[in-house]
């Protein structure tokens, strides 16, 4: 499973979760910063990524269009990079089940 972290999350997160989520990327490393959400959405769909973001716009897009791609919505407000890393690590099993599911489009983690 590979995650695509949105620009509202630190690009330093990827290096701290890559053992659990191989081939994960940050939009910055893909030259997708300051890019329309629709382009990021299409990139994730075309490349089998699960989008991870705190952006409510992706939540709305997921409700409107469903999946793919799947969307992990971090409803955590301002949080440190360490806390976000811990959330992604602690919820590996939940995120894996979500990614493998056929019906779910959104996973909300708080």
Image (cartoon, grey):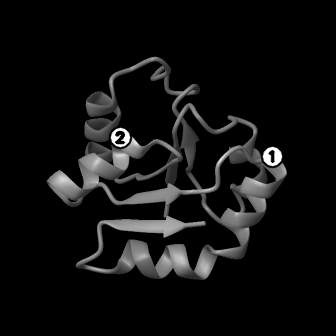
> Which residue, given by chain and number where applicable, does mark 2 sit on?
57
Q: Residues within 10 Å of mark 1 (few under 14, many from 20)?
A: few
Q: Name the spot of residue 32 as percent of width and height, x first.
A: 45, 23
Hey, which quadrant is residue 68 in on the image? Answer: bottom left
56 and 43: which is toward the camera:
56
Q: Position of residue 103 (x, y in %)?
A: 23, 78
The residue depicted at 63 percent of the width and 39 percent of the height is 9
Residue depicted at 61% across the width and 61% down the height: 21
- Quarter the C terminus occupies: bottom right
Q: At which x and y percent is residue 109?
A: 56, 67
Left or right: 19 in relation to 6: right
- Helix, strand, or loop for circle 1? loop
Nearer to the camera, 33 or 106: 106
Q: Which residue is mark 1?
A: 80
- Residue drawn 79% across and 56% down? 83
**Cα separation between marks 2 and 1:** 21 Å
Vertical relation: 14 (above or below) 70: above
Looking at the image, residue 95 lies above or below residue 11 = below
Q: Position of residue 50 (x, y in %)?
A: 42, 56
Q: Is residue 92 left or right of residue 42?
A: right
Q: Is residue 92 above or below residue 58?
A: below
Q: Is residue 77 left or right of residue 44?
A: right
Upstream in sequence: badge 2 or badge 1: 2
Looking at the image, the residue that sits furthest to the left is 65
Q: Secondary structure at mark 2?
A: helix
């Amino acid at each position: 499973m590979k995650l695509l972290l949105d620009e509202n999350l630190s690009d330093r997160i990827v290096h701290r979760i890559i053992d659990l989520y191989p081939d994960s990327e940050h939009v910055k490393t893909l030259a997708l910063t300051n890019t329309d959400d629709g382009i990021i959405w299409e990139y994730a769909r075309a490349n089998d990524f699960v989008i991870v973001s705190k952006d409510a716009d992706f939540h709305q897009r997921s409700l409107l269009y469903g999946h793919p791609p799947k969307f992990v919505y971090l409803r955590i407000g301002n949080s440190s990079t360490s806390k976000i890393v811990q959330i992604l690590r602690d919820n590996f099993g939940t995120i894996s089940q979500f990614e493998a599911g056929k019906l779910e489009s959104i996973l909300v983690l708080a």
